[in-house]
């Protein structure tokens, strides 16, 4: 009886603690919403297409109806230059930023990001969230083997990267002129000896070098080349319009580029920014990513990725990107 009484006390105490956490969390959220109502509209810097930015924020306003935002959209390098130039001039013109890995690390290095450990970030892979709480992955771009299924017989469809070295594919592979992150990632994950050997053998296949993944997907669809190393999103966008394109799901690994979400250190709308980040990282927000046509970063949101061997571009590669860029240029530039 004594043990039963002690067990009941423990269970009761645990239940009380859980209730306290729930009530405290709800109270804190109410306080944040009240504070956010007094803040000005969010200023969002983003590398994502305008339609993505607008659809995500529209979904956010279903949860936070008073929220408003303005956007500045540009390529990652342009955004980085703008942010650093504004910071040097003492200006702080953004509250939230969606930008790539390398640029995120640079912005963080200049101490321009706010530490915020969103409760939603715990639902992400450890590799996809900053251990110090300055950023979290938002959406991913998979780098895959794309193929024209009208030109490539089923028995010839590659299953892994090494299959690209089959003499059958000589001069039949498209490769982007700046596929540096994929290049560095395979060398990192496979080890330098195996990775370099593969890349040198791939060069001997005389890949057709092109600038831009959209262009690669278009000429792949048109039949100029049967295969390409490309973005899954570029392939799917054309496939939905009837193009005879598909991508290989069995390569090991499938390297992915990240679009990362962060809050500015000097934001004047911290509460609204945190509410927005919480929404973007939540399952609800990540489902909006899928509706917009991109791959959600949060595991478990998409049921089509469970079997994929997904690996992010390693931090070591991002931090040493210039070295890998020079290696890639020397190897593949003609």
Image: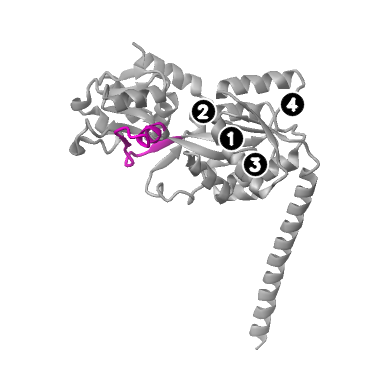
**Element marked by disc 4:** loop
Let me know if residue 249 is in the magenta part: yes
- Pick the residue in front: 201 or 142: 142
Farthest top residue?
334
Q: Is residue 287 visible?
A: yes
**Element marked by disc 2:** helix
Disc 1: which residue: 53
Let me know if residue 17 is in the magenta part: no
Compare marks 3 and 1 and give the one earlier in the sequence: 1
Farthest bottom residue?
1
Position of 15 relative to 152 (above/below)? below
On residue 318, which mark appears?
Answer: 2
Magenta residues, start to end:
234-256
Label 3 vs label 1, nearer the camera: 1
Disc 4: which residue: 92
Label 2 vs label 4, nearer the camera: 4
Q: Callout 4 environment at 10 Å: few (<14), some (14 to 19), or many (20+)? A: some
């Amino acid at each position: 009886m004594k043990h039963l009484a002690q067990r009941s006390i423990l269970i009761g105490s645990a239940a009380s603690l859980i209730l306290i956490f729930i009530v405290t969390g709800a109270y804190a959220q109410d306080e944040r919403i009240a504070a956010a109502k007094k803040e000005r509209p969010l200023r969002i810097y983003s590398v994502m297409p305008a339609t993505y930015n607008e659809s995500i924020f529209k979904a956010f306003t279903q949860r936070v109806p008073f929220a408003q935002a303005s956007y500045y959209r540009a390529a990652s390098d342009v955004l980085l230059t703008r942010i650093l130039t504004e910071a040097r001039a003492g200006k702080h013109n953004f509250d939230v930023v969606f930008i790539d890995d390398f640029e995120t690390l640079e912005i963080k290095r200049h101490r321009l990001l706010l530490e915020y450990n969103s409760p939603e970030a715990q639902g992400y892979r450890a590799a996809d969230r900053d251990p110090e709480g300055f950023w979290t992955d938002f959406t991913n771009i998979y780098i895959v083997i794309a193929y024209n299924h009208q030109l490539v017989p089923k028995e010839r469809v590659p299953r892994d990267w090494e299959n690209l070295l089959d003499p059958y594919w000589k001069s039949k592979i498209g490769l982007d002129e700046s596929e540096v992150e994929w290049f560095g990632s395979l060398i990192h994950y496979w080890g330098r000896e195996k990775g370099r050997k593969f890349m040198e053998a791939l060069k001997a296949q005389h890949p057709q070098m092109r600038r831009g993944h959209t262009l690669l997907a278009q000429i792949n669809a048109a039949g100029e080349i049967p295969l390409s190393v490309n973005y899954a999103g570029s392939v799917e966008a054309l496939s939905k319009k009837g193009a005879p394109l598909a991508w290989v799901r069995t390569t090991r690994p499938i390297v992915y580029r990240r679009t990362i979400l962060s809050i500015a250190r000097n934001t004047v709308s911290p509460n609204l920014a945190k509410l927005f980040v919480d929404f973007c990282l939540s399952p609800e927000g990540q489902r909006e990513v899928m509706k917009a046509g991109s791959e959600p970063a949060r595991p478990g949101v998409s049921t089509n990725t469970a079997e994929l061997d997904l690996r992010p571009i390693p931090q070591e590669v991002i931090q040493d990107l210039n070295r890998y860029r020079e290696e890639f240029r020397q190897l593949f530039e003609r």
